[in-house]
Image: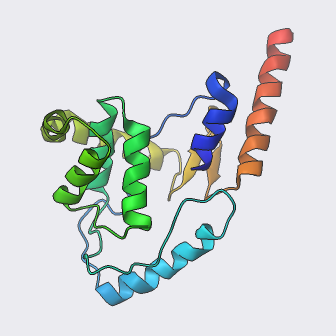
Amino acid sequence: MRLVKLKEEFGDSLQVEWKSFLLRPYPEPKSMEKFRQYTHSWMRPAGQPDAGEFRVWSTDEPPPSHSVPPNLAVKAAERQGRFEEYHLAVMRAYFYENRNVTDPQTLLAVADECGLELDAFLDALKDEELGRQVARDHNEAVSIGVTGVPCVVLDDGMLLPGAQDLTFYRHVVNKRLSIQARDVGN
């Protein structure tokens, strides 16, 4: 949410490129009780200004088993030029609506709710290149030291791990833009 707000604020002066990072690259079933306990940790970021919407898991849907399906789905939506809208909808489906975002039917339902062209979405999901792209993104992140999400990687490779507040991100962007302006003036 914060990066979306920054992009709106800074416009073309700020380039944001989203990449995949697989927190759980392989299916790992979790017990509902342990997963519900884990989701209490979501309330810390939920209490921060400019945070997304979060809710402790309250549905009977099983916990998501791994990160690959939603990462493939956002790349499929990106092919229709709808990455941001779909990405935010999947985040809301998971963190607030407590839907299992590893379930293909959930990902398809979110695509439908976003107004995506469903046949094109399904065709993209079948394209093996999508999986290779997710794997490349993930491997690149690991190679530069990313260990979790969120993590912002600046153009010089500097990592900003964790959910930073909007004021901090704004400060970093303003500082970078002032350095660029100074360098152009010299």
Q: Position of residue 111 (x, y in %)?
A: 26, 46
Observer able to see residue 164: yes
Residue at x 32% of width, y 79% of height: 59
The residue nearer to you, when weighing 173 against 57, is 57
Residue at x 43% of width, y 66% of height: 95
Question: Which quadrant of the rendered structure holds the C terminus?
Answer: top right
**Chosen colour scheme:** rainbow
Q: Quarter of the image holding residue 24? A: bottom left
Q: Quarter of the image holding residue 155? A: top right
Side of 3 where 137 appears, left or right: left
Side of 168 where 83 appears, left or right: left
The residue nearer to you, when weighing 96 against 20, is 96
Q: Is residue 59 above or below residue 84?
A: below
Q: How many marks?
A: 0
Residue at x 30% of width, y 30% of height: 80
Observer able to see residue 21: no
Q: Quarter of the image holding residue 22? A: bottom left
Q: Position of residue 144 (x, y in %)?
A: 52, 45
Side of 58 where 65 appears, left or right: left
Q: Position of residue 148 (x, y in %)?
A: 50, 59
Residue at x 50% of width, y 68% of height: 54
- Going by the picture, which residue comes out furthest to the bottom? 33
